[in-house]
Image (cartoon, rainbow, N blue to C red):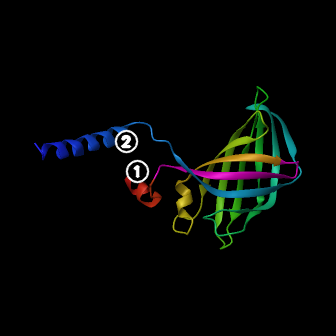
Amino acid sequence: MHLFIPLLTVVASFATSTAAQDGPVPPQMSLLYSMTALLGDRFSLGPIPTGDERIVIPIVGGSFHGPKMNGESTVLSFGADWRLTDAQGVIRPDARYNIRTNDGTNIYVRTEGYPLPDGRTMLSGKFETGSNGTYAWLNDVVGVGVLRRNGTTAVIIEMWHVGALNVDLSSARANY
């Protein structure tokens, strides 16, 4: 009987932890970077078939930093937000640009988003860089960001990495 009770406790513990893993598990978020992107003069493509208007806003520079991004880094001066105003009048950002870390790694960034009533814009981010470099892990990152306008000449973006708890991305790729 004395052996049965500890064994029952272990089985109950295992069953509880297994059942808990079957339920929803919220993602963990960690800061990728904070960025100030400088904007050039915008221009309109006019009315387009997929929406009311597309406005091109050149990204002409800026800087970013983050805990895994090796200090101060640069937003390169080629890229733009190809912002769409859809048929309902909703402004939808569609930006493609490049950033360079202070160790010289080039990273392509694509963000799309949706405006919030308070003036901020929620973004989803996708990253692409060399598959064998220091930042190869970014190729598998799901990014979520918040954009705030700083007048008409700059935007401030906080970009977050959304992931599962305790997951090593290098081993996750092998199991996909």
User: Tag 1's secondary structure?
Assistant: loop
Using residue 15 as the reference point, say whether residue 163 is left or right of it. right
* Badge nearest the viewer, 2 or 1: 2
Task: Give the quarter of the image for residue 93.
Answer: top right
Q: CA distance from mark 2 to mark 1?
A: 19 Å
- Marks 2 and 1 close (CB-CB < 8 Å): no
Upstream in sequence: badge 2 or badge 1: 2
Q: Which mark is residue 21?
A: 2
Q: Residue at x 55, y 69 (%)?
A: 134
Residue that protrudes farthest toward the left in the picture: 1
Give the prevailing secondary structure in the magenta stretch. Answer: strand
Q: Is residue 167 above or below residue 117?
A: below
Residue type highlighted by circle 1: Tyr
Using residue 147 as the reference point, say whether residue 25 is left or right of it. left
Which corner quadrant holds the N terminus?
A: top left
Q: Position of residue 31 (x, y in %)?
A: 62, 55
Q: Residue at x 79, y 61 (%)?
A: 62
Q: Position of residue 169 (x, y in %)?
A: 47, 57
Is 58 or 7 nearer to us in this picture? 7
Q: Position of residue 49 (x, y in %)?
A: 75, 31
Task: Give the quarter of the image for residue 123.
Answer: top right
User: Tag 2's secondary structure?
Assistant: helix
Using residue 155 as the reference point, say whether residue 4 is left or right of it. left
Q: Position of residue 2 (x, y in %)?
A: 12, 46
Q: Is 154 a magenta residue? A: yes
Please rate how many residues cluster around mark 2, counting C-alpha atoms within 10 Å: few if below 14, some from 14 to 19, many from 20. few
Q: Is 75 a magenta residue? A: no
Which residue is under mark 1?
176
Please rate how many residues cluster around mark 1, counting C-alpha atoms within 10 Å: few if below 14, some from 14 to 19, many from 20. few
Using residue 107 as the reference point, say whether residue 152 is left or right of it. right
Write down the region rendered in magenta. 150-165
Q: Which mark is residue 142?
A: none
